[in-house]
Amino acid sequence: MQLVIDQHSPTPPYEQLRVQVIEGVRAGTLAPGDKLPTVRRLAEDLGLAPNTVARAYRELETDEVIETRGRLGSFIAATGDATHRQAQLAAVAYAERVRSLGLATDEALVIVRTALGIRS
């Protein structure tokens, strides 16, 4: 998978990198167990500071998209696309909280649509 950073984009480079890795997992171009380049190598290849790549890797690891195995490097996690699982867990937590607050389903959906920027 070819990772590309758009220097003119308003999206920070670490976020562009993070999103591209997630998209690669979803598309199947990055499979569980695939080894990612080292932070230094990827930073050099993309013309970024190592801290920028390290931040993207940290966030991907937090989201369970990748796993770091010490000196062995970083790999696509065995769970693959954990972002859907994380979103489902967040949705369940939101639904439970809405019920505990006594909000109607329609009202809860309006709140979600507004938060997502959906104008209906």
Image (tube, rainbow, N blue to C red):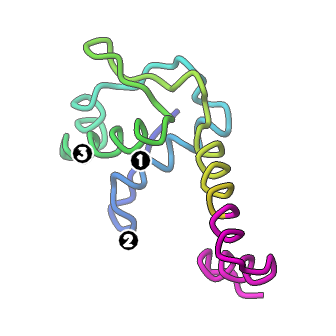
Q: CA distance from mark 2 to mark 1?
A: 13 Å
Residue at image location 60% in from the left, 55% down from the top: 90
Residue at image location 63% in from the left, 49% down from the top: 89
| Residue at which label 1 appears | 17
Q: Quadrant of residue 80?
A: top right
Residue 63: x %, y % from top left: 47, 42
| Residue at which label 2 appears | 10
Looking at the rendered structure, which numbered label has been put on residue 47? 3
Query: SS of the residue at dot 3?
Result: loop
Residue at image location 44% in from the left, 22% down from the top: 75
Identify the amino acid type marked 1.
Answer: Leu
Classify mark 2: residues with Cα within 10 Å, few (<14), some (14-19) or many (20+): few
Q: Which tag is nearer the camera, tag 3 or tag 1? A: 1
What is the span of residues highlighted in magenta in the rendered image?
A: 95-120
Residue 15: x %, y % from top left: 40, 55
Classify mark 1: residues with Cα within 10 Å, few (<14), some (14-19) or many (20+): many
User: Of marks 2 and 1, which one's residue comes earlier in the chain?
Assistant: 2
User: Of marks 2 and 3, which one's residue comes earlier in the chain?
Assistant: 2
Q: Is residue 2 above or below residue 38?
A: below
* Image side of residue 120 versus residue 52, left or right: right
Residues 88 and 45: in front is 88
Q: CA distance from mark 3 to mark 1?
A: 12 Å
Is 107 colored magenta in this rendering? yes
User: Of marks 3 and 1, which one's residue comes earlier in the chain?
Assistant: 1
Query: SS of the residue at dot 2?
Result: loop
Looking at the rendered structure, which numbered label has been put on residue 64? none
Name the main secondary structure of what is drawn in magenta. helix
